Image (cartoon, helix red, strand yellow):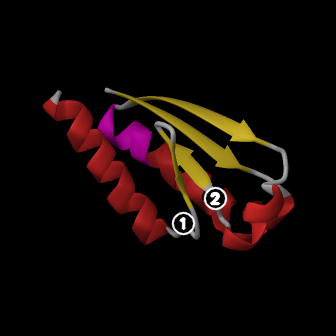
Amino acid sequence: MSLKIRICMGSSCFRRGNRMNLEFIEQYIDDHGCSAEVELVGSRCEELSRKGPNLQINGQMYHEVNLEMLSELLVRYVENESDE
């Protein structure tokens, strides 16, 4: 299974929680033996900053991502990859 995750690490998203989201993703990948390409995007999200923290999984953008939402997203994506 393979996930492509882009994490906005601009100052607003970082301050709003993407630092913790990154740590959670790294631990999830280790715990579940997933292969994932995690790309840290250091640029600002421009008009999306107010909707942060923002991240993208396999091309789908998500806003206001907290740890609970992120956990649900990762489970969903990992299960979908396993079913294929």
Disc 2 marks a residue whose amino acid type is Asn
Q: Residue at (84%, 46%) from the top-left corner?
A: 43
Q: Mark 2 points at which residue?
A: 54
N-terminal label among 2 and 1: 2
Q: In which quarter of the image is the N terminus?
A: top left
Per the rendered image, the range of residues in magenta is: 28-33
| Left or right of residue 23: residue 76 | left
Marks 2 and 1 in Cβ contact (< 8 Å): yes
Spatial CA distance of label 2 from label 1 is 6 Å
Q: Could you say where residue 63 lies in the image, as x and y percent from the top left? A: 58, 64
Q: Quadrant of residue 47?
A: bottom right
- What SS does tag 1 mark? loop
Q: Residue at (61%, 41%) from the top-left corner?
A: 6
Q: Could you say where residue 38 lies in the image, as x and y percent from the top left? A: 58, 34
> Any magenta on residue 31?
yes
Q: Residue at (70%, 39%) from the top-left corner?
A: 40
* Secondary structure that dominates the magenta span: helix
- Local packing at callout 2 (Cα closer than 10 Å; few below 14, some 14-19, many 20+) is many
| Left or right of residue 65: residue 2 | left
| Left or right of residue 18: residue 50 | right
- Name above or below for residue 34 compared with residue 48: above
Q: Name the residue under label 1.
A: 65
**Which of 21/65 is in front?**
65
Q: Residue at (84%, 53%) from the top-left corner?
A: 44
Disc 1 marks a residue whose amino acid type is Val
Q: Could you say where residue 80 lies in the image, as x and y percent from the top left? A: 23, 39
**Which of 11/32 is in front?**
11
- What SS does tag 2 mark? loop
